Image (cartoon, helix red, strand yellow):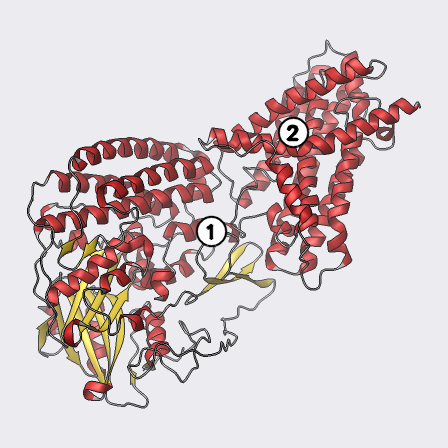
Amino acid sequence: MPMDLCLGGKATYDIPSNLPCRRTTVGAVDWHRGAEMLQAAGGRLLTLWGADDRDRDGRFRIYAAFLVKEGVAVFEHEMESQSKPTYPSLAEIFPCALHMERAVHDLLGIASMEPDHRGWLRHGGWPQTVFPLRRDFDGSQQFPIDSQPYAFVQVEGDGVHEIAVGPVHAGTIEPGHFRFSVVGEKVLRLEERLGYTHKGVAKRFEGMQQKEGHRLAARLSGDSAVAFSWAYCAALEAITHTTCPPRAANLRALALEHERLANHLGDLGALGNDAGFAFGLTQFSRMKEDLLRVNASAFGARYLFDFVEPGGVVVDLPENASRSLLDHYLVLEEGVSSLCAIYDNHPGLQDRFRDAGVLNQELAEKLGAIGLAGRASGVSIDLRVDYPYPPYDRLNPKLVIQSTGDVGARVQVRFDEIFESLRLCRMLLEDSASGPIRTDCPFGVPGRLGLGLIEAWRGPVVIAIESGPDGSIRRCHAHDPSWQNWPLLEYAILGNIVPDFPLINKSFNLSYSGHDG
Amino acid sequence: MRAISFVRQFVEAALAIAIAPLFTGWIAQCRAWLQNRSAPPLLQPYRMLRKLFLKDVALATGASALFRATPYVLFGTMVLAAAIIPSIVTDLPLARVADSIALVGLFATARVFLSLAAMDIGTAFGTLGARREMMIGFLAEPALLMVLFNAFLLYGSTSLPSLVDGYRAHLSVIDPSVIFAALAFVMVALAENARIPIDNPSTHLELTMIHEAMLLEYSARHLALVEWASSLKLFNYACIGFALFLPWGIATHGADGAGALLIAIAALIGKLTIAGAALALIESLSAKLRIFRAPEYLAMAFLLAVLGLLVHLLVGA
């Protein structure tokens, strides 16, 4: 494997995962050089996380997971120093690493050698000398809020002024701050500030029972509940050598595609509404609501929380459900087709969608775009297609891709994915796999690292679990693709006008909660 | 000038104040139906006003007297405008003081006050909205004046009541220029009243707002007055449109007894019903334009109005 080659013959080990996954322990030089080589070979940064192992061997560790042609490569780097642990930054190779490195610094006090150490998740909720994800930190501690001004990059020049938007918005949406530097209506620069919804999920995972963690994972970003709980279960099942029964895998995929459908329907309606076309919103909202009701009757939950559990799924479909689901798909497909025609033929909407918020392929590749937003810019990456984990290995999912990278492309990808998801759902229902829907999932051996990767509607979600003693979790890192894609927005808006921002932002529709953790 | 004229004048203004929110409510209802939603009650705008009047004002730090005075100025100018637009009668004593060019000036006064008040607070959104409003305003005004000039050429007066009376006198004249002027007027009215395709009155996206962005800091009775003034403005534009292009039913000078007045009110309500439904239809069918398309849109309105003038001159010659 090239992952072996690029590390100068260093030994690699398999990591339990639902994708082919190898791990290498690297020194500081190889950490940087290896990442460079992976990047040159077309690899992408999936996630970056740190761990405090001082109680075990006196070390801090930093991990980076990359998506390469053969699967996932994980680098593990140990830091000798307990007082000032540092490691080489990957940000110049993978720009999206910058925010992740700043988050690791806020939570663990492991600093990359990149000079930007402004707090990313730390907004003054805890002192700068306290690191909540260290093992000796007591999660129940409280600190007075000590909010410091945040040094936004200033743009200077004749007629340049700043518009500060958020974190509280006029609509009922999640909090995030956007600092625009504009001339007239034209945006010269956008700087995002996130972290307002940091809940300390990673800390909460510590010590939790392995059999319970999927519930917390599902709640990291509510619109990707199935994806996160499945990724968690995939990681845990890989650690414990449990095989999910085929029937359960089918049901998980069915739920995941339903989640994708519901989110795409909601987004398409909201995109119409943000362009002033309220008709689209009401029609798509109705279809989304119908789908959620179908979810409630078929899976027992509208938003599919806690449907996936370690070892399988909670309930099987009720009798005759597949008949009514197939009927519903027909109605849904017809409705979406006719609305797709309306969107396509509406000159006003097309004028707003086309050439707005363009992210070209070259820039998207460079910034490490993944998931839906990446595919709209011609970045061909979809875990279901590239590394078909069960049951996708039997479904032959098609890659949906657009090349223009504008709002219109992100709309079109959503439309096409709805039709593709409906095709997958039909195949899953026709698949006659029967049998048990869950199997027993034993405790994981302490100290084992496992990865779960699932293509959620927004992009790949990653969960890395390290098992602790007696069926507990030692460390669990949950990663939402919004980490990679938030920075894209800062580039997609450049040269556009301020009133187009909400539409462009909606076309990405990234998660605040999933990102802030 | 008889006292009864002043009574009519009073009735007309009071009627405008009373039913302007109803017109807004009707449009909201039609929009909801056209979008397959269940509609809010027709009287929802009144409930909204009541709620706002009962609340305590939250004033931004550093708000000046201008900010506090603006809602009253807005409401006042719109009521005054309603008083000089012949919506049900043409025998309006106040209308003799101000012709339709002064009317355009009245709308401009309101705009200037609201824009200044929005900038007074010093928030980014207020200034953003004010800037955009001025851009729309200075493009829409000439187009509106051109529309009015069309009517002046036809009937030889700049006073709206005399226009309506004049129309009655020349009932047989059907001038093709009217069609151009009417189209231009509808386009200007949509832009001036912050409707789709220029602005979206129901948006919550602060970065896209024009009119709403200027109101973000207003609350309670101030907001109520500003909202009411917005309703009145829309009502006024509708009545200008009726006076210029659909003057049937308006009680003209000399024929304005109680019976004629009742007929005029009935005709007005009928026309508002149709106009509201038509406005909702336009809004439901179109998407919002990119803001830099607004100049093209308003230039189009201006062009149509000029074409109307040319057609009139060519045909009339």
- Residue at horizontal 21 percent and vertical 33 percent from the top: A324
Mark 2 → mark 1, Cα distance in angstroms: 30 Å
For marks 2 and 1, give the one nearer the viewer. 1
Where residue B15 sits in the image (x, y, percent)? Answer: 74, 29
Instruction: Decide: is A233 above or below A296.
Output: below
Instruction: Decide: is A284 above or below A255.
Output: above
Q: Quadrant of residue B125?
A: bottom right
- Residue at horizontal 13 percent and vertical 61 percent from the top: A19
Where residue B149 sits in the image (x, y, percent)? Answer: 74, 28
Disc 2 residue crowd, few under 14, some 14–19, many 20+, Cα 10 Å: many
Q: Amino acid at mark 1?
A: Pro
Residue A470: image tag: none
Residue B193 visible at all: no
| Residue in front for this viewpoint, B151 or A235 | A235
Q: Looking at the image, how many numbered discs can be counted on the residues?
A: 2
Disc 2: which residue:
B185
Secondary structure, mark 2, is: helix
Where residue A332 sits in the image (x, y, percent)? Answer: 28, 34
- Residue at horizontal 62 percent and vertical 46 percent from the top: B211
Circle 2 marks a residue in which chain? B
Q: Is residue A300 left or right of residue A514?
A: left
Disc 1: which residue:
A502
Q: Is residue B116 left or right of residue A299?
A: right
Where residue A294 sits in the image (x, y, percent)? Answer: 27, 39
Instruction: Decide: is B154 above or below B208.
Output: above
